[in-house]
């Protein structure tokens, strides 16, 4: 499978991947204001649907959400790039956490912007990654520079312990380390308190730590807070 080739002067063909249909509709509406720059050719709300849709429609750029229930953006990247190294990925996420940015860049994304971006800025970012540039929201660029630099104190490119945690476990851990109660975490992430407890238990088991105070210190050491 090979990615669709860009035609000079033509709109960039874009595929949206996000598990929230309302958000996808909003992105479509925003990008429709720049029809000469970008054209949304398809969308998906799950990993499997995204992989199939990208293979069928062969877009030039995929706008990729980082956190989805069935594996997230990293899984889409892994499966698509195993077949097609030409398609370009631009992460578009509500998360501005360093480990999320680094994970998708390691996976092969060409850029990472947050969902506070305007429609006009997003269209420009799509055009730029399609042309070969790397694009990041301003404060996120530093995470990437730190991760791939050799200076003392830089974040490691890979952390085997951190890699054991799922994206949702990292979300729960980050809020826990910030001092949120279980009920507050549940409200922030739109999950039940029981689910929060399950995630915390899983994180404790994977990290071999005993309590939330040790977890908070562990998370702080890895710049999750």
Image (spheres, rainbow, N blue to C red):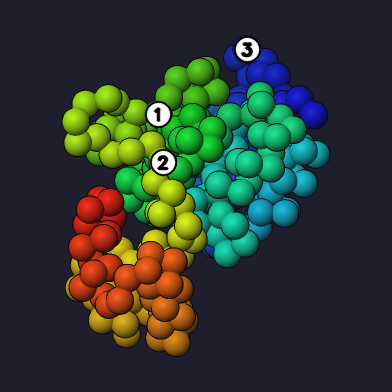
x and y percentages locating residue 7 in the rendered image:
67, 15
Q: Residue at x 43, y 72 (%)?
A: 205
- Asked whether the viewer can see residue 28, the reply is no
Residue tagged 1: 135
Q: Residues within 10 Å of mark 2 (few under 14, many from 20)?
A: few
Q: For the N terminus, which image quadrant?
A: top right
Q: Residues within 10 Å of mark 3 (few under 14, many from 20)?
A: few
Indicate which disc, 1 or 2, sits on the residue closer to the N terminus: 1
Q: Residue furthest top?
A: 8
Secondary element type, mark 1: strand
- Image height check: is 43 above or below 20? above
Q: Is residue 98 left or right of residue 48?
A: left
Front tag of 3 and 2: 2
Q: Residues within 10 Å of mark 1 (few under 14, many from 20)?
A: many
Q: Nearer the viewer, residue 124 or 144?
A: 144
Q: Residue at x 65, y 58 (%)?
A: 46
Q: Nearer the viewer, residue 98 or 111?
A: 98
x and y percentages locating residue 154 in the rendered image:
24, 35
Q: Nearer the viewer, residue 39 or 138?
A: 138
- Asked whether the viewer can see residue 173, the reply is yes
Front tag of 1 and 2: 2
The quarter holding residue 143 reads: top left
Q: Is residue 212 left or right of residue 55?
A: left
Q: Which mark is residue 8?
A: 3
The residues tagged by marks 1 and 2 sit, at their Cα atoms, a distance apart of 22 Å
Front tag of 1 and 3: 1
Residue tagged 2: 158
Q: Which mark is residue 169?
A: none
Q: For the C terminus, which image quadrant?
A: bottom left
Query: Do the CB atoms of the residues marked 1 and 3 lie less than 8 Å apart?
Result: no
Indicate which disc, 3 or 2, sits on the residue closer to the N terminus: 3
């Amino acid at each position: 499978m090979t990615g669709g080739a860009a035609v000079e002067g033509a709109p960039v063909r874009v595929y949206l991947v996000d598990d929230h249909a309302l958000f996808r509709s909003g992105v479509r509406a925003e990008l429709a204001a720049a029809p000469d720059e970008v054209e949304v050719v398809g969308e998906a709300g799950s990993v499997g649907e995204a992989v199939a849709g990208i293979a069928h429609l062969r877009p030039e750029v995929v706008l990729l959400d980082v956190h989805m229930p069935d594996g997230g953006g990293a899984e889409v990247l892994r499966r698509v790039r195993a077949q097609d190294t030409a398609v370009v990925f631009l992460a578009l996420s509500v998360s501005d956490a360093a480990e999320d940015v680094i994970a998708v860049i390691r996976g092969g994304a060409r850029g990472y912007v947050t969902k506070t971006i305007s429609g006009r800025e997003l269209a420009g970012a799509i055009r730029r990654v399609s042309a070969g540039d790397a694009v990041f929201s301003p404060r996120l660029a530093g995470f990437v520079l730190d991760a791939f630099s050799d200076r003392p104190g830089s974040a490691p490119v890979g952390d085997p312990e951190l890699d054991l945690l799922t994206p949702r476990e990292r979300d729960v851990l980050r809020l826990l380390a910030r001092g949120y109660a279980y009920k507050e975490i549940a409200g922030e992430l739109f999950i039940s308190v029981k689910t929060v407890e399950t995630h915390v238990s899983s994180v404790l088991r994977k990290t071999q730590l005993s309590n939330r105070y040790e977890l908070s210190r562990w998370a702080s050491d890895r710049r999750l807070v």
